[in-house]
Amino acid sequence: MHPEEEKIAQAKQRWQDTTYQKVVGRFPERRAQFEATSGIPIPPITTPADVNLDYLADLGFPGEYPFTRGVQPTMYRGRFWTMRQYAGYASAEESNARYRYLLEQGQTGLSVAFDLPTQLGYDADDEMALGEVGKVGVSISCLDDMRTLFREIPLDKVSTSMTINAPAAILWAMYIAVGQEQGVEPAQLRGTTQNDILKEYVARGTYIFPPRPSMRLITDTFSYGAAHVPKWNPISISGYHIREAGSTAAQEIAFTLADGIAYVQAALDAGLDVDDFAPRLSFFFNAHNNFLEEVAKFRAARRMWARIMKERFGAQDPKSWLLRFHTQTAGSTLTAQQPMNNIVRVTLQALAAVLGGTQSLHTNSMDEALWLPTEQSVRVALRTQQLIAHESGVADAVDPLGGAYLIEQLTNELEARANAYIETIDEMGGATAAVEQGYMQAEIADAAYRAQQAIERGEQVIVGVNKFQEEEEKVALEQLKVDPAIEAQQREHLAQIRAERDAARAATALTAIERAAKEATAPMMPLFVEAVKADCTLGEICGVLRQIWGEYQPKVIL
């Protein structure tokens, strides 16, 4: 230990034994042990002597390796993060109106929420879609739906994020086709498809095909994007849903980056060069309640990914080392009780994301624990971001919490714990093998169970739920309701599309997909683009792939 650090350590010990202990002896602290969600102890104070830190190797400077302090040299001093509110419900017409409203209110990027049938590759007129059309997102079954969704929205002027996974390549093909109809070439399109199937098996459940063919679809989008849509992020490797399923912050980092490692390795195994696709990889994280841990989480993930790409995969392009990420505030923390409290929760979570260096942000609406958000509640959520950006001052400095002793200690500890998980996953054969063996699912389930026990024992306070309750809840909020007639309208629309399309062209396109699916390495994306232009529906295309590849059956976790 450096002499100055030794001096500080001795002074801290004196303070603990005297000044601190005198007060604790008279007024005991609220808990015997304070911990972050990952089980990391939170000491009363942290000093330079407590932090094992090589400033240049571990922190460095913003915009430079290892990017702990941010991926951009100026961060928000140049421009703010993209304010991208997740939205979509009912029909393409209604969702289009919501998107145009949000853009008028100052939103700077679009984020599409699809309904459950779309996420699972079913058309709106499929019997599996009964009662679910348009309920939790917009119903998109064919190219005409996508055309309507982006009517009067110039795709060369906005960036669009699409939360779609198992059928992501097909929805992306529709978006590309709509852009071309607008006169926008694929090379001009900007945005992201989530396209992260591994986390679906682990945490979310909207999978269709088994892991191996699903990974083939993903690497195919990497190749197609690098060649034709260079400004598009073909994947958003997502920790968000892992955290929503109950993981700790350390598990969120570890399992997300382990999935990222699997995608990179799969692309390399398919013959791609790492620096051809890695610069367009993006990530998606949760902003949860433990404020300081969350700030440290983003910093640790950024540093870990830079080292993984440079040291493990030998990437040469500095852009390949960047962990660029979108953040959404934690839906699982929203409460139906006293819903106005959710505004405060979301504000703290959004602030953590900004202080952690996010590139784009969605803030949840106060009423989402009750129903789909209304225009009023969405506006408040967007204004929350705008207030942080324009009034708080936190965007005026690059990495304003960098160097704070506790933040750096938490960053180091989260990195160490996440690396330990990744080592275990590597020993199992990687993330795909770990998913197939149920390892990550079991770890998340255990963490979720422990967290729920803490809530039920009252050790973790949820304001308005297990403390500070009100006897009679009166929710005086407007409710957004989806008209059930949307389902019948979509059925009629699809019947018309099938009746009026060139049947021979559609059949030829589906046959080409069937042949390619039977081969190990045949490119799929060009065939999807041709198929949607021929008015083949999402369900028809996924149906062909289901016949060839089958459907995933999850491992039972007890």
Image (cartoon, rainbow, N blue to C red):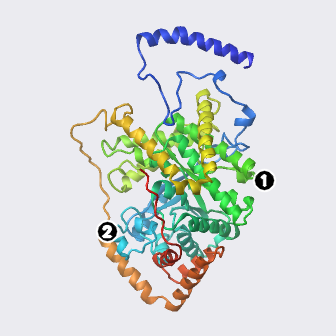
Counting from the top left corner in percent of width and height, residue 1 is at: 72, 20
The residue positioned 45% from the left and 43% from the top of the image is 446
Image position, residue 15 (x, y; %): 57, 11
Three-letter amino acid code at the position of disc 2? Gly
Q: CA distance from mark 2 to mark 1?
A: 50 Å
Q: Looking at the rendered structure, which numbered label has been put on residue 316?
A: 1
Left or right of residue 30, residue 215 in this image: right
Q: Is residue 214 left or right of residue 129?
A: right
Q: Is residue 344 visible?
A: no
Q: Residue 500: image x %, image y %? A: 45, 89
Q: Which residue is mark 2?
A: 131
Q: Position of residue 243 (x, y in %)?
A: 48, 47
Residue at left 39%, top 67%? 94
Q: Are marks 2 and 1 in contact (CB under 8 Å)?
A: no
Rendered position, 444 above or below 176: above
Q: Is residue 405 above or below residue 253?
A: above
Residue in view at x 69 percent, y 15 percent: 6
Q: Amino acid at mark 1?
A: Gln
**Front in this rendered view, residue 62 or 76:** 62
Give the side of residue 350 with respect to residue 57, left or right.
Answer: left
Q: Is residue 85 visible?
A: yes
Of the residues under marks 2 and 1, which one precedes in the sequence?
2
